[in-house]
Image (spheres, rainbow, N blue to C red):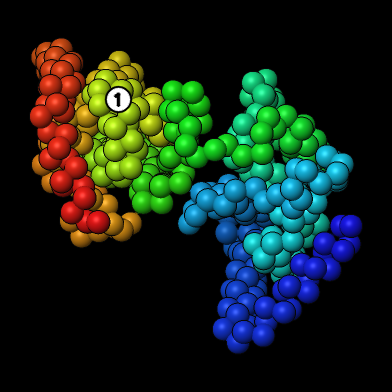
Amino acid sequence: MIGYLLWIRMKGFFTGLRNPWKIVLHLVLLLTVYAYGRLFAHVINKTGNGEIETLSPEKMISVIWVLIAGFTIVRMFFPTYTPIRQIFPKYLPVPKFQRYLLSVVTELTTSYFFYLFLFILFGCWYLDYSKYWFLYSCLTALITSILFKRILQYFIDFRLKRYSLIMLGITAILILTLFYIGNFLLLSFGYLCGLLPLLLFLIGFKLDCQIIESKKIDLQPITKNANVYLKLLINNRQARLLLLVGILFKSLLLIGDYGLFKGKGKHLFDGQIIYWMFASPLILFTYVFNNIWGFWTNVWMNVELRSGKSKHLINFTLKLLLLPLIIDAFITLPILLFTWDNHQFILLFYAVSLIFLVCSSFLWSILFPITINSYFQMKGSSSFVSSLSAMVSVIALSLIKINYWFYILIPLFLLFSFAGYRLALDVYREKKYQIYKKLNKGY
């Protein structure tokens, strides 16, 4: 059956080549993969010859397979999210293991896997150093990341039994343990990496057996299924793209600041005003969360028609904010705590700015909603007033770093946060019809 599936996939590929534009596209992809494979091999050869003293071939190879694994995970959400493909309907009498195996094989016969596999082969062909380690580690990273991506998709696409979350936690702990061991025993880590795809394959099969129903229905009550918030973030293309761009941009700045601090003992922007704008979660709000109902208009209308209570909308907003803000905190706080000695200031600044931005986002989303028609529209994804107010507030809060007298701003910001929250509840009763008029101008 697997051989027949591979034959159908190959036949479909060659049948698609009847279109001349597809032939041109595949040729361009092939040449691109060849060029990148040869380029990375050239760089690794230079590290082996001593022309690049700061890197070794092994370190450069580790950077490549980390990029392969990271790109595979990011591709799950960008540019679009594609659910796990089910080869057979549930009612067909196909054994569970065979059904799961064919689904995995389908993942490994996509054009994405094919061209990355060619990239690895081209790189291995032109390498003069560590050929087999490059082939082994990169191919293992590719298969491992695809299997790990499938495990994440099970929690997005399907409704699973409760203890399935334990399997995801065990998977994360095992992967982190292997990376920790790899810092000390490179050879042992290589052998352990070979076992990782097998481990993820078995965990994925176990999760496949824990599916309660074939697919989650789209119209579910919000309060009964927490995964709906993750789906709302993933399936909203505009919000997903802006959040990914914002988090990636911020991560690059903070990583660059960490490298600059370790190398020269300095900070980006001299650690002044602009620096603290990026150190706070400000970018997530100016990009998306100061205009929540502009991005999730249909959800707002649905909740309004069902209950019409502002507290339900606030509850929805908090749950929608939870995952992006957790990711932002995990990226930001470790780097700030490593590069700055004043840990008290860092924790207070981040916590107070987070509370203020969250509470003010309720008010800005009600007062200044903007219809979102494209990914990067000229008028912006949130209002100028909300963005300017958020930036000025974060800059003012960063003054507590200059002098201890400015710590008096902290209770004031907390008071303003509570006042903004209460004002949002009161204003919503009067402004909700204006929200509808503003958001439906683009339709």
Q: What is the tally of numbered marks visible in this picture?
A: 1
Q: Which of 176 and 230 is in front in this view?
A: 230
Residue at x 43%, y 28% (from the top left corner) = 222
Which part of the image, by quadrant, shows the N terminus?
Answer: bottom right
Which residue is disc 1 drawn over?
307
Amino acid type shown at disc 1: Ser
Label 1 packing within 10 angstroms: few (<14), some (14-19), many (20+): few
SS for dot 1: loop
**Position of residue 195 measured from the top left corner of the image (x, y, whole percent):** 81, 38
Q: Is residue 390 left or right of residue 143?
A: left
**Position of residue 34 measured from the top left corner of the image (x, y, whole percent):** 65, 74
Residue at x 82%, y 64% (from the top left corner) = 6
Residue at x 81%, y 46% (from the top left corner) = 92
Q: Which of 293 and 356 is in front in this view?
A: 293
Figure check: 98 above or below 225: below
Which part of the image, by quadrant, shows the C terminus?
Answer: bottom left
Q: Residue 409's quadrant in the figure?
A: top left
- Using the rendered image of the protein, determine whether residue 349 is visible from the camera's viewpoint: no
Residue at x 67%, y 24% (from the top left corner) = 161
**Position of residue 254 measured from the top left corner of the image (x, y, whole percent):** 37, 40
Figure check: 33 above or below 294: below
Q: Residue 201's quadrant in the figure?
A: top right
**Position of residue 243 measured from the top left corner of the image (x, y, whole percent):** 37, 44
Q: In this view, does 108 lie to the left or right of 75?
A: right
Q: Residue 268's quadrant in the figure?
A: top left
